[in-house]
Image: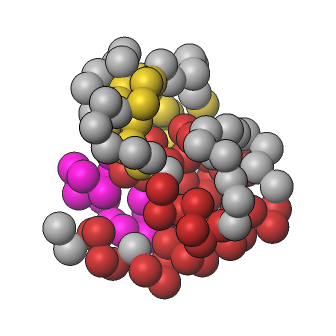
């Protein structure tokens, strides 16, 4: 997958939900020429993957991957496998360590059907 991310996302911690972030400014991610636009106000989380991937800080090189992944899961305009693959590609693009992105990706493949059903 070819990834292009013109700007880093601007987000803040949610006021009442620990581990949840709120996108403050419209953000986009371009994947193989497809432009995915995430609107400001969108809420995404990193809490669950922290459990799966070990002690990851609240944000880092993988934050954009979780953001686009949660967006694709919420709009359901793609397959679940595509959304998971985009997450993996963005983590690689941002230089997440191989042991981290592998662990996160396989955990999402194994358990992502639960949030996908919502």
Q: Is residue 53 above or below residue 111?
A: above
Residue for point 29% across, 22% down: 40
Q: Is residue 85 magenta?
A: no
Q: How is the image coloured?
A: secondary structure
Using the rendered view, name the quadrant where residue 25 is placed: top left
Using the rendered view, name the quadrant where residue 15 is placed: top left
Give x and y (percent) for residue 73.
31, 57
Using the rendered view, name the quadrant where residue 41 is placed: top left
Q: Is residue 37 visible?
A: no
Q: Is residue 23 visible?
A: yes
Give x and y (percent) for residue 90.
62, 46
Q: Quadrant of the C terminus?
A: bottom left
- Is 30 positioned to the left or the right of 21 in the image? right
The one of 1 and 25 positioned closer to us in this rendering: 25
The one of 5 and 95 positioned closer to us in this rendering: 95
- Is 78 positioned to the left or the right of 61 in the image? left
Q: Is residue 82 magenta?
A: yes
Give x and y (percent) for residue 46.
49, 51
The one of 8 and 80 positioned closer to us in this rendering: 8
> So how many labels did they put on this image?
0
Q: Which residue reaches farthest bottom?
A: 110
Q: Is residue 56 above or below residue 41?
A: below
Residue for point 48% across, 32% down: 29
Give, as a single range, the part of the protein colored magenta: 71-84
Residue for point 70% across, 59% down: 55
| Magenta stretch: dominant secondary structure | helix
Give x and y (percent) for residue 61.
69, 39
Residue for point 43% across, 24% down: 12
Q: Is residue 95 above or below residue 21?
A: below
């Amino acid at each position: 997958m070819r990834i292009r991310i013109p700007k880093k996302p601007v987000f803040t911690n949610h006021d009442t939900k620990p581990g949840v972030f709120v996108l403050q400014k419209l953000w986009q991610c371009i994947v193989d020429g497809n432009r995915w636009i995430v609107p400001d106000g969108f809420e995404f989380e990193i809490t669950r993957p922290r459990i799966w991937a070990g002690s990851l800080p609240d944000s880092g090189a993988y934050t954009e991957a979780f953001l686009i992944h949660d967006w694709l899961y919420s709009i359901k305009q793609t397959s679940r496998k595509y959304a998971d693959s985009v997450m993996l590609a963005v983590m690689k693009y941002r230089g997440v360590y191989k042991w981290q992105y592998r662990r996160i990706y396989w955990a999402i493949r194994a358990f992502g059907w639960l949030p996908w059903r919502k």
